[in-house]
Image (tube, grey):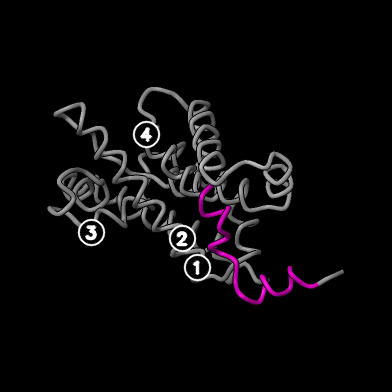
Amino acid sequence: MRLSRSPTIQTLAVFLVVFALRSALRFVSPFLATSLFVLAPPVVVHPWALPLSVYAHHNVPHLVSNAVALLFAGLLVERVTTTLRFHAYFLAVGMLAGVAQIWVTGLFSPTVPGVLGASGAVFGLFGYLLAGNPVADAVLGRLRLSRRAQLAALFVLAFLATATTAAPGVALLAHFTGFAVGLIAGRFRILRTETQATNNDRPV
């Protein structure tokens, strides 16, 4: 596969373009740099920030950490899906994670900090990898858990994975949401194409 056709590499390219644009705007107009790329309540005031915030990053370390994590998870996930599904999934999970972060935070605090970054979407990729593989099927099959018990186990796993990233300023709710959605999506194989499903069902 050519690098230009890799949805992971394409997403990294978007990261870089958005980071360069936001960095330039911060010198020209800090207000635009915030209103365009930082997701903050109420979302309807700046709806364009909902998708743009997924690809924006605060600084170079923030960008590099998400880029490295994306490479690890993205290059594996893209092997089982199409480019369109990959991008749609990444964007949808990222937006959902961002909304969850500001909505839940707003329930407990009148002041809600803005959110930006792809960590929620990247956690969604890792969650998909963890739940959508044959090893997970074998383990859950042997445990013979009910559907509710499986769901509860997935949310406990999401909580534990989120706890490992706890640090000041980290959007933990976004991480939890992304990972939980990824686990559920992985169990249902929502990114798998019909052709891949047919091939996987063939006897060997």
Separation (CA) of disc 4 from disc 1: 25 Å
Identify the residue shown where x is 53% and y is 70%.
83
Residue that carries the numbered disc 1 in the rendered image: 85
Q: Is residue 133 magenta?
A: no
Is there CB contact under 8 Å for labels 1 and 2?
Answer: yes
Crowd band around label 4 with a 10 angstrom C-alpha radius: few (<14), some (14–19), many (20+): many
The reply, left or right, for residue 1 in relation to residue 113 is right
**Measured from the top left, where is residue 43 in percent x and y?**
18, 50
Q: Is residue 194 magenta?
A: yes
Foreground label between 1 and 3: 1
Identify the residue shown where x is 20% and y is 34%.
106
Separation (CA) of disc 1 from disc 3: 21 Å
N-terminal label among 2 and 4: 2
Separation (CA) of disc 4 from disc 3: 20 Å
Separation (CA) of disc 3 from disc 2: 18 Å
Q: Label 1 amino acid?
A: Arg
Residue that carries the numbered disc 3 in the rendered image: 48
Residue that carries the numbered disc 2 in the rendered image: 89
Instruction: Specify start and end residues of the magenta stretch as a single range.
Output: 183-202
Q: Label 3 amino acid?
A: Trp
Taking depth in this image into account, of 125 and 16 the one nearest to the observer is 125
The quarter of the rendered structure image containing the N terminus is bottom right
User: Which SS class for mark 4?
Assistant: loop
**Measured from the top left, where is residue 154 in percent x and y?**
54, 39
Q: Label 4 amino acid?
A: Ala
